[in-house]
Amino acid sequence: MGDVHYIESGVGAPLVLLHAFPLDARMWNPVRTRLEDRTRMIAPDQRGLGESALDGSSAHPLAGGDRAAAPDVELAAADVLELMDRLELPRAVVGGCSMGGYVAMAMLRAAPERVAGLLLVDTKATADGPDQQANRRAVADRAESSGTGDWLAADMLPNLLGDTTRQQRPEVVEQVRGLIEEQPAAGVAWAQRAMAARPDSTGTLRGFGGPALVVVGAEDGITPPQEAAKMADLLPDGELVTLPEVGHLSALEDPDAFTAAIGPWLNRIG
Ligand code: MLT
């Protein structure tokens, strides 16, 4: 049995939601409380982050039984598939924000038959270029050598949150800062290296015939609206929603608008 930690709540059709970097499953709490009367939400912590161990013991065939596996979004996806096995969930709507979106796309490559619908939030289909990969590896090295306590949140907050949130929602800024500061440095390093190595998912999206919703914050500077529009175009049954006055963490920045955007889609796909 795997040991991925997860938060589960609500009743209804299952929705597996994968968190962004460098956060954990708690980023979905504001959405969870708004959807709990109609959706069974399962939010895992990616290995090494939140309460999930770094040496995840995934027994899923894709994990190859390698407990000290190299950083890889495909392995993060295998952990989630194994969690779905544990929960006896043959299929679920799978959604992810940013890094969680990269993992959702890896799930689609590994086991498309288990994805009843795809929710891509502030993410992108393309792989990193050499500069971005080098930058991620430098962040990973720094996290391992000096921890993340005094610099990671300060470096990331300006990009993770939209201008409106940074100016008008101080409680969200502090909430995200707190989540970042609680993440173990080794898990931060693993996630950065996994993202650096991720493949291009363009073909993966083109080949997914199920329902898909792409949500993006109008002020998202990391995975901007143009990237979201490209993904929606690639997806044969893709729809696009752009949320005003929010950035890269749209679901946390304005959970009412986010829930209003995904609720009708979830109802429609059942
Ligand atoms: C995230 O929010 O998960 C990260 O910003 C994704 C990334 O660095 O590409």
Image (cartoon, helix red, strand yellow):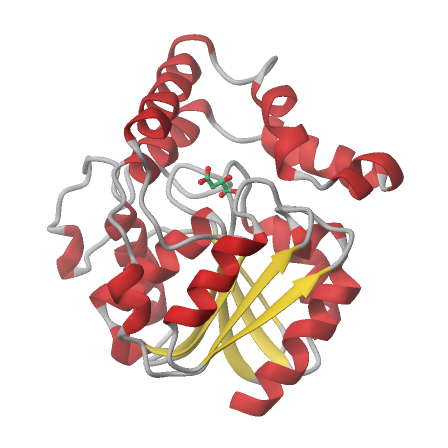
Could you say where residue 105 lies in the image, as x and y percent from the top left?
A: 34, 61
| Residue 82, visible in the rendered structure | no
Nearer to the camera, 13 or 118 = 118
Rendered position, 225 above or below 262? above
Quarter of the image for residue 242 reads: bottom right
Could you say where residue 230 lies in the image, as x and y percent from the top left?
A: 44, 62
Horizontal relation, residue 16 to residue 195: left or right? right
Nearer to the camera, 39 or 56 = 39
Nearer to the camera, 194 or 92 = 194
Could you say where residue 235 lies in the image, as x and y percent from the top left?
A: 39, 74
Could you say where residue 46 lies in the image, as x and y percent from the top left?
A: 41, 47
Q: Which quarter of the image is occupied by the N terminus?
A: bottom left
| Residue 19, visible in the rendered structure | yes
Most distant residue in the right direction: 168
Q: Total number of numbered labels?
A: 0
Quarter of the image for residue 251 reads: bottom right
Rendered position, 97 above or below 211? above
Horizontal relation, residue 235 to residue 43: left or right? left
Residue lying at 61% horizontally and 26% vertically, measured from the top left: 181
Residue lying at 72% horizontally and 41% vertically, measured from the top left: 162
Horizontal relation, residue 147 to residue 265: left or right? left
Most distant residue in the top direction: 146
Residue lying at 37% horizontally and 36% vertically, measured from the top left: 191
